[in-house]
Amino acid sequence: MINLRTVLMICLFGLGLSATKTQAQEVKMKGAALWKTLADVSFEIKKDEYGDLYVPVFSEAINGVEGEVVEVEGFIIPFDGMFKPTELILSSLPISECFFCGSGGPETVMEISMKEKIKYTTKRVKIRGKLKLNADDPDQLMYLLTDGVFVGLADDSY
């Protein structure tokens, strides 16, 4: 037979676990504030076997959100003529202005690895995940989001 003290201990333990889980999921930064922070990047020129290579130098503010859970809003950019529902590129700008098709810089796009498939849409979406910075691999974008989770469509507030 379980006594009242045991029941209370189990409840307190459960509350502690759910509080830890909530804190682990806490969003450090999101929306326009995130993109504004990510725009504060500079570049230095280094040489490799192919010539000049522009290497990102991340600001203190950007380094402060590395490894944190963030919520990014943007437009899904189809690449290589197709859409991959678990590996995608998100742009803070619409396709006509994005880094690949328009006037945006490399700080306006992010490579995202989703936990689950996402349906393609031309509307702005919200995705939550862990931000990683990339200054070493020129075959990837400089901003990476891992464990991406679709949060929903973004509103038209900005």
Image: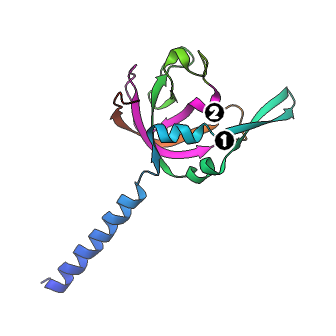
Residue lying furthest left? 1
Instruction: Classify residue 149 by image quadrant.
Output: top left
Residue 138 shows up from this direction:
yes
Q: Which residue is drawn at 40% across and 37% down?
A: 116
Q: In this view, does 80 lie to the left or right of 57?
A: left
Q: Is residue 49 left or right of residue 69?
A: right
Q: Position of residue 37 (x, y in %)?
A: 57, 42
Q: Do the numbered discs 2 and 1 sit on residues whose CB atoms are within 8 Å?
A: yes
Residue 141 is marked as 2
Q: Is residue 135 left or right of residue 124?
A: right
Q: Where is residue 81 in the image (x, y as percent from the top left)?
A: 54, 14
- In the rendered view of the protein, which quadrant contains the N terminus? bottom left
Task: Indicate the amino acid at tag 1.
Answer: Asn
Q: Where is residue 119 in the image (x, y as percent from the top left)?
A: 37, 25
Q: Is residue 130 magenta?
A: yes
Q: Which of 147 and 154 is in front in this view?
A: 154
Q: Nearer the viewer, residue 84 or 155?
A: 155
Q: Does the magenta stretch include residue 133?
A: yes
| Residue located beneath label 1 in the image | 134
Q: Which residue is drawn at 61% across and 47% down?
A: 62
Is residue 87 depicted above or below 40 in this figure? above
For the residue labelled by badge 2, is the local secondary structure a helix, a strand or a loop?
Answer: loop
Is residue 134 depicted above or below 20 in this figure? above
* Magenta range: 105-134
Q: Nearer the viewer, residue 61 or 119?
A: 61
